[in-house]
């Protein structure tokens, strides 16, 4: 928000100037990926289109919005699969845009994508050590814990709220459920099913 370039204005929480949206409506409604129509991840896609057109995207901390969220594991994983595909697809678009914006944003976007990759490599190294040597070396656990605490500390500092440190409890879910899901998403990027209808 400091740079006027929030990279994803979440669907139910976003508002756009009508005049800005009118300029981009044709591009927005004809979203394609690898030659096939793609209509999920539209919030991230529209945000990237706005930034490419030279508009600012802002975070408004006192805005209030309501949305429906998954309350069981199946719908949650389907949502995360859509989000992962959308993130991968639109990161490719965003990378071309980033040099025109601020250097910090490039670091942030690259970090958001490299973080899960490094976590996956650490988890795979731990599994390989467990299979070969019968135990997991202490440094693997320390690496994963350090990566988790750095990420959560940055979020806590940015938000100015210590409760974001509690997000570290999400790490086992991330390692055992979401990382395999993200790997699957990367292998099935051309699939545009919403998986919920």
Image (cartoon, rainbow, N blue to C red):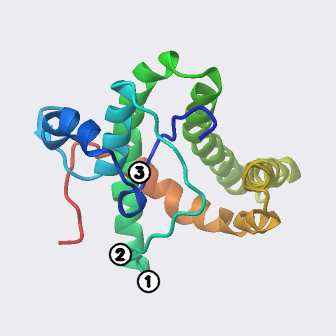
* Image position of 174 (left or right of 7): right
Tag 2 near tag 1, CB within 8 Å: yes
Q: Position of residue 106 (x, y in %)?
A: 57, 26
Q: Residue furthest top?
A: 99
* Image position of 27 (left or right of 150): left
Where is the N terminus found, in terms of image quarters? top right
Decide which of 88, 46 is in the foreground and name it.
46
* Image position of 154 (left or right of 123): right
* Image position of 85 (left or right of 100): left
From the image, tell me which residue sits under label 2.
75
Q: Position of residue 31 (x, y in %)?
A: 18, 39
Q: Residue at x 48, y 16 (%)?
A: 100
Q: Residue at x 62, y 36 (%)?
A: 111
Above-or-below relation of 82 to 121: below
SS class, disc 3: helix
Where is the C terminus found, in terms of image quarters? bottom left
Residue 29 visible in this rendered orientation of the protein: yes
Decide which of 40, 6 is in the foreground and name it.
6
From the image, tell me which residue sits under label 1.
71
Tag 1 near tag 3, CB within 8 Å: no
């Amino acid at each position: 928000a400091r740079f006027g370039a929030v990279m994803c204005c979440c669907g139910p929480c976003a508002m756009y100037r009508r005049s800005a949206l009118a300029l981009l409506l044709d591009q927005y409604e004809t979203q394609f990926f690898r030659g096939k129509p793609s209509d999920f991840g539209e919030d991230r896609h529209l945000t990237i289109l706005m930034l490419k057109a030279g508009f600012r995207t802002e975070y408004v901390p006192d805005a209030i919005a309501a949305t429906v969220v998954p309350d069981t594991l199946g719908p949650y994983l389907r949502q995360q699969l859509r989000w992962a595909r959308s993130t991968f697809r639109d990161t490719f678009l965003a990378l071309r845009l980033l040099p025109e914006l601020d250097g910090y944003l490039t670091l942030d976007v690259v970090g958001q994508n490299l973080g899960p990759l490094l976590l996956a490599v650490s988890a795979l190294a731990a599994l390989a050590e467990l299979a070969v040597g019968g135990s997991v070396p202490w440094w693997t656990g320390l690496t994963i814990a350090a990566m988790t605490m750095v990420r959560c500390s940055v979020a806590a500092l940015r938000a100015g709220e210590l409760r974001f440190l509690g997000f570290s409890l999400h790490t086992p879910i991330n390692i055992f459920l979401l990382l395999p899901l993200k790997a699957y998403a990367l292998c099935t990027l051309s699939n545009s099913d919403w998986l919920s209808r």
